[in-house]
Image (cartoon, helix red, strand yellow):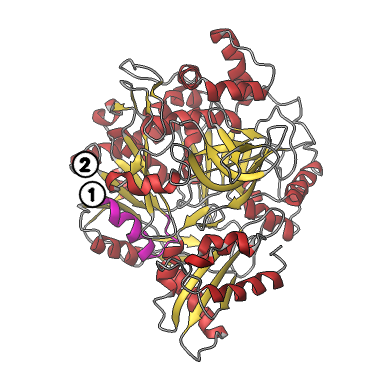
Amino acid sequence: MKSQSATLPISQLRRYQDWLAEHRGLRFESYDALWRWSVSDLEGFWRSIWDHDQVASPTPFEAALVIDRMPGAVWFRGAHVNYAHQVFRHASAAHAAGQPAIVSEDELGNIRSTSWPELRRQVNSLALKLREQGIERGDRVAAYLSNGPEAVVAFLACSSIGAIWSLCAPDMGIQAVKDRFGQIEPKVLIGIDGVHYGGRSSDRSAVVMQLQAVLPSVVTTIIVETSHSSQRVPGSLSFASVVARHGRDVESFLPEWLPFDHPLWILYSSGTTGLPKPIVHGQGGVLLTTLATAKHIDIGASYVPETLGERFHWFTSTGWVMWNVQVAALLCGTTICLYDGSPSGPKDRLDWSTLWRFVSRHKVTFFGAGAAFFGNCKKASVQIARCGDLSAVRALGSTGSPLPMEVQEWGTKEFDTIGTRDIWWCNLSGGTDLTAAFCTGNRDLPQTPGEMQCRQLGSAVEAWNDAGQAVIDEVGELVCVRPLPGMPLFFWGDEGNRRYLASYFEIYPRIWRHGDWIKITPTGSCIIYGRSDATINRHGVRMGTSEIYAAVEELPDVLDSLALDLEYLGKAGRLLLFVVLRPAMLLDEALKLSIGEVIRRRLSARFVPDEIIQVPQIPRTLSGKKQEVPLKRLYLGHAADTTFSREVMANPDCVEWYIADARSRRLAC
């Protein structure tokens, strides 16, 4: 084990503990004692976060936790907040200290720096324009944007007036975007007409026009215009002209005060059947859980003298929840650094040092990415010392999938070569469902490669065995036994909360089941072993298997299919796609290419399988459901007798084929 160097400024968690001692008279002998207090006294803990971070409300609130139940907890009833208001609370001081709000760069080397006053002016300009277009509280704004400043501006403008934000990445196909935005009936579409990714330009204007056609609720379209498009989107407004507004009305604009549980955004997390789940999070819930998360990530006000120049970068697409986490650093007055492009450079000449050079150019202090990125850097033998001056980097963040021990050890050794001893790894696990972490880091604790240092404050996370008992040092289901303010308000259009309850509370009533395998060690650290359900999770971006099937099974030669996303500690994850073909058909390279192309076109390239396998049958229940979870358990090494209930299967004989295949892959017991 290694501990973080004592030469760094005092951590944000230590600052918070000092504040508790001074203002609450609370002192804790260990992090474990602090965590146990935070999950047993939810009223005291969340009120302390509110007070410590000076969350503003023009109205008093009844209590931090008014109704203590799950689901259905009621938080801070009576309070009024606004995410954008909290972001700009630090603006004057950060600007006075010479810190920009946003630094952004694209693949072509175009660098932009957005000051705090300029960010506020653009946000106010767009907010006023949305009002003029008739957008009111609760109206949905759908964005099809890449990872540039425009997406940040648009999101904050929506928050300012109480509109509900929803975002998809331009690498997603038209069907995947339609399946998401079509459920929420947006009044505004904010799109980008072209992108440059992997060394190639891509005109997206036709996709935006298709979205206009399939989203009849849209009354206003605003376009970020680029040089990558050959045509103008008809009937649209220019984003650049909309945010160019100046004047007294822009200067005097203030965000609206909204009820604590007013919807902020809609994110999407897919299950194994049906359309993607439109998850609605509230203004106040996101705000409070983000402020708690920031203490663990160890980012604070960038104008505090000892942390002057703090810069946060998490490589993400706009389709991943880490985009939301990245933007949330603004709540702490921290500069965010955005990279819009491929982390590995042009497709014809992969270069896994691309992001490291970006981090060097912009003096990033916290650099986060999906675990797969760091794994690819190790495989490519990236030498950190040759990527520029990385002396500003004090922390590395990883999430999206388990980070193998040897990958973390590789990164630590690489930073040792440039004189940064004991680089701190802040490994996280949470998700779209929360826009926060369940398991996370703590710079003041020892770190063990491949593990997360602790459970997050306020998150009553446990590992449960098959009997529903909390276990230590054993792999079990990740559950949360107390409510969190960042849990979803509801799913959009979910009558009677049926999908919401089935997603998290069907297995254990009144207990949140997250869908991950977890082990909590005797020291309180955590190890995630991958998904316990069938959701596809590719580098942190989730896709329901039903979306894969809808794409693949449109091919006339594919009669049936089943996808398995296999994640396991210490090994590379694999996405397997099993297909049943028309009689006498054989799976050849041409058909494999066709399957990959239809997934790439309809969904995204990230969901193209690592391997496609022809099978005689797909195992199904008597009611016709595909046996995804039992099959996944089989391929992860569980015995067939404990994973399949053959008496409820329509075709139990086909299981033998999969047992043999799993055994041949040396994954079964």
Name the residue nearer the viewer: 64 or 413: 64
Q: Residue at x 50, y 89 (%)?
A: 585
Q: Which mark is residue 135?
A: 2
Q: Which image quarter: residue 359? A: top right
Dot 1: element: loop
Give me the residue at 49% from left, 17% from top. Answer: 44
Q: Is 496 a magenta residue? A: no
Span shown in magenta:
169-186
Residue 174 belongs to magenta span? yes
Callout 1 environment at 10 Å: few (<14), some (14 to 19), or many (20+)?
Answer: many
Q: Marks 1 and 2, Cα distance to the nearest angstrom? A: 8 Å
Residue 572 percent location from the top left of the image: 67, 60
Contact (Cβ within 8 Å) of mark 1 with mark 2:
yes
Residue 527 visible in the picture: yes
The rendered magenta stretch, by its main secondary structure, is classed as helix
Q: Residue furthest bottom?
A: 584
In the rendered view, would you say 499 is above or below 15?
Answer: below
> What element does badge 2 sit on?
loop
Q: Which mark is residue 187?
A: 1
* Foreground of the two, 219 or 261: 261
- Asked where in the image residue 256 lies, by quadrant, the reply is top left
Identity of the residue drawn at 33% across and 22% down: 77
Say which of 555 and 333 sits in front. Answer: 555
| N-term mark: 1 or 2 | 2
Q: Position of residue 87 (x, y in %)?
A: 43, 29
- Percent x, y of residue 382: 73, 55
| Residue type of the residue flagged with mark 2 | Ile
Q: From this viewpoint, which residue is outermost toward the front?
A: 647
The amino acid type, in three-letter code, at marker 1 is: Lys
